[in-house]
Image (cartoon, helix red, strand yellow):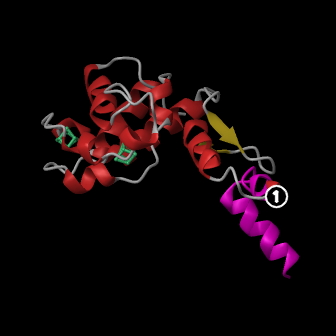
Amino acid sequence: MKNRKDKIAEAKRVSGADSCVECGRCVAACPMAEMYANFSIEMSPRGIIKKTLIGDPVVEDKNIWYCTECNAGTDTCPQKVSCRDLIRKLREAAVDENLLENAKTCKCCGRAFVAIPVEDFVFARLKDEPPNVFGVLDICPPCRREIYLLRNA
Ligand code: SF4
Ligand code: SF4
């Protein structure tokens, strides 16, 4: 298995993070500013990119778990850096190291499949829905698909 250093190098490579020119456009486009009352530059795409590039501890940083993976920052980025791809890779590295306190695991297969801060936001929006909606959301999309196919076989 790759070590953390290699995984961070891969995260930088797949996202193009090294090309960042620190313009901040991705921060302006990122929906997290409207989603979270505790939004800060630390949580922002620019903040995560900067920490990654200067070698600060980022794999264990809770701030990597607020992103929705929308990739809106990339659409406005002059360098086409993918904040989504960077954060996905950092999360994968965290899961590999069993740093799972901010990741929800599927009740069926046990895989980490959603960031808990993102889920908290979604649940707050769904608070008036019937309780069975929340049960469905405890299972990851691949397992949900499998259960659906078995039931309809
Ligand atoms: S992918 Fe994440 S960091 Fe990038 S704009 Fe979307 S929520 Fe923000
Ligand atoms: S928009 Fe692109 S270049 Fe500008 S800060 Fe964000 S990642 Fe860096």
Q: Which residue appears at 68% of the width and 49% of the height?
A: 127
The reply, left or right, for residue 79 in relation to residue 5 is left
Quarter occupied by the C terminus: bottom right
Q: Quadrant of the N terminus?
A: top right
Give the residue at x 34% y 30%: 48
Q: Quadrant of ligand 2?
A: top left
Image position of 111 (left or right of 107): left
- Left or right of 99? Residue 90 is left
Q: Nearer the viewer, residue 112 or 97?
A: 112
The magenta span reads: 132-153
Q: Residues within 10 Å of mark 1 (few under 14, many from 20)?
A: few
In percent of width and height, residue 57 lies at 41, 18
The quarter of the picture where residue 116 lies is top right
Question: In the image, residue 37 lies at what x, y percent?
Answer: 45, 32
Q: Main secondary structure of the magenta part?
A: helix
The response on whether ligand 1 sits within 8 Å of label 1 is no
Q: Residue at x 84, y 81 (%)?
A: 152
